Amino acid sequence: MRIAVVGSGRSVHAIARSVAVAGLGHEVRFVTVGDVLPAPGVEVRTRALPRGPLAAARAARGFLTDLRSFGPALLHLHYAGGKLGTMAALSGVRPLVVTVMGGDVLPEQHAGGLSRLERRATRRILAAADLLLVKSEALRPALEAWGGFAGKCEVVRWGVDPATFHRDVEAAAALRRRLRLSPADRVILSPRPLQPLYNVHLLVEAMPEVVAHVPSAALVITEYNADPGYAARLRQAVAALGLGDRVQFAGAVATRDMPGLHSLAEIEASLPSSDGLPQSLFEAMACGTPVVLGRLTAYREIVTDGESALLADLEPRAVASTMVRLMTDSALRDRLARTGLERVREVGFLPRELQRVDSLYREVVARGAARERPRGRLLDLLGLLLR
């Protein structure tokens, strides 16, 4: 089957899922603008990010040509929002499958919320979709709130392939040397994007208490999709708290190095204010690394507090005490690692989830696209120009 995919070329998730679908034997063309991460087995069509209205018009024309000329059996859009999302919906390529990523339908994940134009664009994309895929049941109410769209959604968690994500002691040792960590350093990993939404500052503020109980504790912060101002404030906080070499900023770690990084960590922490269901949680559990999470509804679909992860309130003292508890109780760490690995095999096994995606693709193609309502397309185009 020919499958056209639209999404950000810098999104690890959009690229990884496209590669996985291609691995099923489908012919996949990924269409976007701007830089694209490596995508083995996937045909990539992209253009430079346009500057100015004329360049934008040319890029849009080329984008639509790349989609339509492929003659896809369906179009899969990753992220129900943004200009790429609107152009995908306007392309007329159907059936349209949309993966809801979280930030597209959870306005609280955006500072100041979504603008009126962005909200309209997201609602139009959700309305145009023939099938919506979400990673957690917790996103169903959000879809319902956007206009009663929960009825056409299916939960697909994607998950991880154990052939890729597993305990890798050699890769962990190599990363320890590259990051100049001593053999005695006990690593706490923050694997989420370095942005205010993910509350990485809570980990920094918790570290003095953690180090007081576990002097060899070392916080490693990844800098994927970093907000420069937030990153600068965190570095200032590290210096002000006298943490010195107890906190290390590791840069944007390549996808191929993530199994080694998860394996290097003694524990991981993921503390966003709002979330769908993070891929990093499945990756950590597959690598046998215990995880500390905030108390968000979506996480409770996957883990149980004290059995497969530890949940903490989103404030520094609670985060510190939870991490100290985990770092000073080896039996607890072993239990969480073992149970987490069992749990990810149950609910986040990528080969099984891919078969489900394949079945859903075939069902939506056999069913055919819903008849599109042309009303409002002019406003869609106008909104695209104004956003």
Image (tube, rainbow, N blue to C red):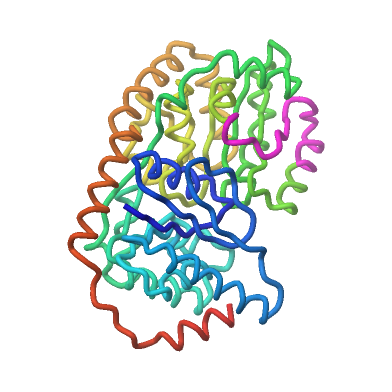
Please state if 75 lies on the left or on the right of 200 as rendered: left
Please state if 171 lies on the left or on the right of 334 as rendered: right
Q: In the rendering, at what x and y percent does residue 25 appear? A: 35, 42
Q: In the rendering, at what x and y percent does residue 271 appear? A: 52, 41
Please state if 124 lies on the left or on the right of 183 as rendered: left
Residue 145 can be seen in this image: no
Vertical arrangement, residue 34 with respect to residue 293, above or below: below
Residue drawn at 33 percent across, 51 percent down:
138
Residue numbers of the magenta segment:
235-257
Residue drawn at 43 percent across, 45 percent down:
17
Based on the displayed image, in which of its 4 quarters is residue 224 positioned?
A: top right
Quadrant location, the C terminus: bottom right
Based on the displayed image, in which of its 4 quarters is residue 217 positioned?
A: top right
Based on the displayed image, in which of its 4 quarters is residue 338 positioned?
A: top left
Check if residue 144 falls in the magenta segment. Answer: no
Residue drawn at 48 percent across, 42 percent down:
41
Check if residue 247 falls in the magenta segment. Answer: yes
Residue 282 can be seen in this image: yes
